[in-house]
Image (cartoon, rainbow, N blue to C red):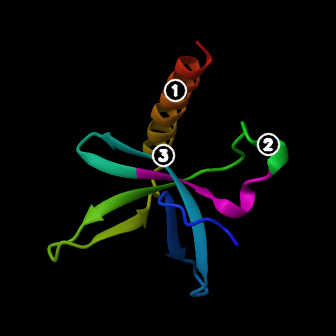
Amino acid sequence: MADEREDVVVLLDENGEEVEFEHLDTIEMNGNEYVVLLPLDQETEDSDDEIDEVIILKIEHGDDGEDSFVTVDDDDELDAVFEEFRIRMEEEYDDVEE
């Protein structure tokens, strides 16, 4: 049986199916918050250190106190958030290697 993980986020896809993601990071930039997620079905034992694809979603805070994740359509915005994520990951791995 799989262990319960606190870093797992479950979202519904376009077909209403549940899809599990690993929460990698939350990034604040330009007055917005973004979440960086890794689809769990991409995790393989052969590629522990390599991430093929991450999903970046903007966090919108609702008036009712509920947060929702929305797709980011602006490529420049996505690139900026991904670059910040990449820099953070490099720094994290550098700290571990020392």
Whichever of callouts 2 and 1 sits on the residue coming sooner in the sequence is 2
Q: Residue 72: name its quadrant.
A: bottom left
Q: Which residue is mark 2?
A: 47
Up the image or down, 3 lies above or below 11; here it is above
Query: What kind of residue is marked 2?
Result: Ser
Front-lying residue, 48 or 75: 48
Front-lying residue, 31 or 94: 94
Is 87 a magenta residue? no
Q: Residues within 10 Å of mark 2 (few under 14, many from 20)?
A: few
Query: What kind of residue is marked 3?
Result: Leu
Residue 75 picture location, percent across and down: 50, 47
Q: Which mark is residue 92?
A: 1
Residue 50 picture location, percent across and down: 73, 39
Query: What kind of residue is marked 1?
Result: Glu
Number of labels in the image equals 3
Q: Which residues are magenta?
A: 35-44
Whichever of callouts 2 and 3 sits on the residue coming sooner in the sequence is 2
In this view, which residue lies farthest toward the left? Answer: 63
Q: CA distance from mark 2 to mark 3?
A: 24 Å
- Indicate left or right for 20 with 88 as reference: right
Up the image or down, 2 lies above or below 34; here it is below
Whether residues under marks 2 and 1 lie with C-beta atoms below 8 angstroms apart, the answer is no
Q: Residue 63: name its quadrant.
A: bottom left
**Mark 1 secondary-structure assignment:** helix
Q: Which residue is found at the position 16% from the left and 77% from the top? A: 64
Q: Residues within 10 Å of mark 1 (few under 14, many from 20)?
A: few
Q: Which residue is found at the position 31% from the left and 39% from the top? A: 29
